[in-house]
């Protein structure tokens, strides 16, 4: 189970539709760095405006042959969403297996009142909001 960073126990310093952001003190920043370093299978999304977003705290399915993430998901109770991720260029047989599991998660989400969101869409929205915030605070 992923360790929850200490900063998550307090209210965010900034909250928008897509972003919950905390201004970290040195101790919190170091803690997040350590959690990130310990993560074996990283998921990084490269967004259209050159922003990179790292998806953390996801439940991951790892390909035994390649040791790469083939599917990941995260239930976000605070905004009733399920964020999911599948890599680009997943071979057809593996994609078919992932699609079966993705359908099961969609059914669970729908019956629980959760909205499904592709991790790339989440990252792009967040990147767009981060770009706007940077302009506002320069």
Image (cartoon, rainbow, N blue to C red):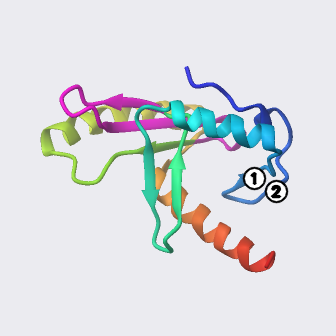
Q: Identify the residue at horizontal 35%, vertical 29% (top origin).
A: 61
Q: Is 70 contained in the magenta span?
A: yes
Q: Identify the residue at horizontal 82%, vertical 56% (top origin).
A: 14
Say which residue label 2 marks. Answer: 14
Residue 79 located left or right of residue 50: right
The numbered dot on residue 21 is 1
Q: Identify the residue at horizontal 63%, vertical 40% (top origin).
A: 33
Residue 56 located left or right of residue 5: left
Image location of residue 129, percent across then percent down: 66, 68
Residue 104 located left or right of residue 129: left
Element at label 1: strand
Residue 1 located left or right of residue 130: left
The numbered dot on residue 29 is none
Image location of residue 49, percent across then percent down: 51, 74
Residue farthest top in this picture: 1
Q: Residues within 10 Å of mark 2 (few under 14, many from 20)?
A: few
**Cα distance in 3D space between marks 2 and 1:** 5 Å
Q: Residues within 10 Å of mark 1 (few under 14, many from 20)?
A: some
State which quadrant residue 131 falls in.
bottom right
Number of numbered discs overlaid on the protein picture: 2
Cβ atoms at labels 2 and 1 below 8 Å apart: yes
- Which residue occupies the foreground of this view, 39 or 125? 39
- Which residue occupies the foreground of this view, 138 or 87? 138
State which quadrant residue 32 falls in.
top right
Q: Is 73 contained in the magenta span?
A: yes
Magenta segment boundaries in residue numbering: 59-81
Image location of residue 57, percent across then percent down: 56, 34
Labels 2 and 1: the sequence-earlier one: 2
């Amino acid at each position: 189970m992923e360790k929850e960073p200490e900063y998550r126990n307090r209210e965010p310093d900034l909250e928008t539709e897509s972003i919950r952001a905390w201004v970290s003190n040195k101790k919190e920043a170091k803690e997040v760095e350590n959690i990130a370093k310990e993560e074996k299978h990283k998921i990084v999304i490269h967004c259209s405006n050159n922003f990179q977003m790292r998806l953390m705290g996801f439940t991951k399915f790892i390909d035994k042959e390649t040791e790469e993430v083939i599917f990941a998901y995260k239930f976000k109770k605070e905004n009733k969403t399920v964020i999911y991720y599948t890599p680009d260029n997943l071979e057809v047989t593996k994609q078919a297996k992932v699609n079966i599991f993705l359908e099961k998660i969609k059914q669970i989400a729908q019956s629980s009142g959760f909205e499904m969101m592709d991790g790339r869409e989440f990252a792009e929205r967040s990147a767009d909001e981060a770009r706007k915030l940077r302009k506002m605070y320069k």
